[in-house]
């Protein structure tokens, strides 16, 4: 019979992960004043190039005209709703996994972006928001001479 050493810190790490998930759900689903409760959140990816920060948001089946985008100095907020199609009587769903309802997503942007010059484009269900970097935030190459 093998003995396994019990480490109480393993249980604490598991408890912390569970509490983090619970707290994250509570914070992200909290309604904003005057807004509807967010039911789901679209998937995003954020990356940067030398000149800009790009945020891509997955919004298939959503009319881009109904999506509100707000950019401040350090936060990008995307708000909208995916409306459910009219229910027709006589439908007996075996499975229903499509997401419907309001969504709200606030994302932190790196320092040094020019939020007032943000641009958005929607193509094939992907909303792409481009925010230019300020001159101070752009990387600069400096040549160092070794003598």
Image: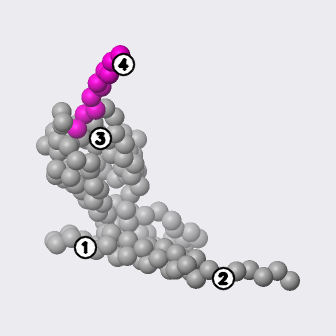
Read off the magenta span: 137-147
> Residue 146: image x %, image y %?
36, 19
* Residue that mark 1 sits on: 31
> Residue 101: image x %, image y %?
34, 67
> Residue 67: image x %, image y %?
25, 53
Q: Where 11 sits versus 81, above or below?
A: below
Q: Quarter of the image for the N terminus: give it.
A: bottom right
Of the two numbered discs 4 and 1 on the same chain, state the one appearing first in sequence: 1
Q: Are marks 3 and 2 in contact (CB under 8 Å)?
A: no
Which disc, if any, is residue 6? 2
Residue 119 part of the magenta segment: no
Which disc, if any, is residue 146? 4
Q: Are marks 2 and 4 in contact (CB under 8 Å)?
A: no
> Residue 20: image x %, image y %?
42, 73
Residue beneath the point at 66% across and 82% down: 6
Q: Where 134 sits versus 105, above or below?
A: above
Q: Secondary structure at mark 1?
A: loop
Please, which residue is most extreme toward the top here?
147
CA gap, disc 2 to disc 4?
56 Å
Q: Where 12 sits versus 145, above or below?
A: below
The nearer-to-camera label among 3 and 2 is 2
CA gap, disc 4 to disc 1?
58 Å
Of the two numbered discs 3 and 1 on the same chain, state the one appearing first in sequence: 1
């Amino acid at each position: 019979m093998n003995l396994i050493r019990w480490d109480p810190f393993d249980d604490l790490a598991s408890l912390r992960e569970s509490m983090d998930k619970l707290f994250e759900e509570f914070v992200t689903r909290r309604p904003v004043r005057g807004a509807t409760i967010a039911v789901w959140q679209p998937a995003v990816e954020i990356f940067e190039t030398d000149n800009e920060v790009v945020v891509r948001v997955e919004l298939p089946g959503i009319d881009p005209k109904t999506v509100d985008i707000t950019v401040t100095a350090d936060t990008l907020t995307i708000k909208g709703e995916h409306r459910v199609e009219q229910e027709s009587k006589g439908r007996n769903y075996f499975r229903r996994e499509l997401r419907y309802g309001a969504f709200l997503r606030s994302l932190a942007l790196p320092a040094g972006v020019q939020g007032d010059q943000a641009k958005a484009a929607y193509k094939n269900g992907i909303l792409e928001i481009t925010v230019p970097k300020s001159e101070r935030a752009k990387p600069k190459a400096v040549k160092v001479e070794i003598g």
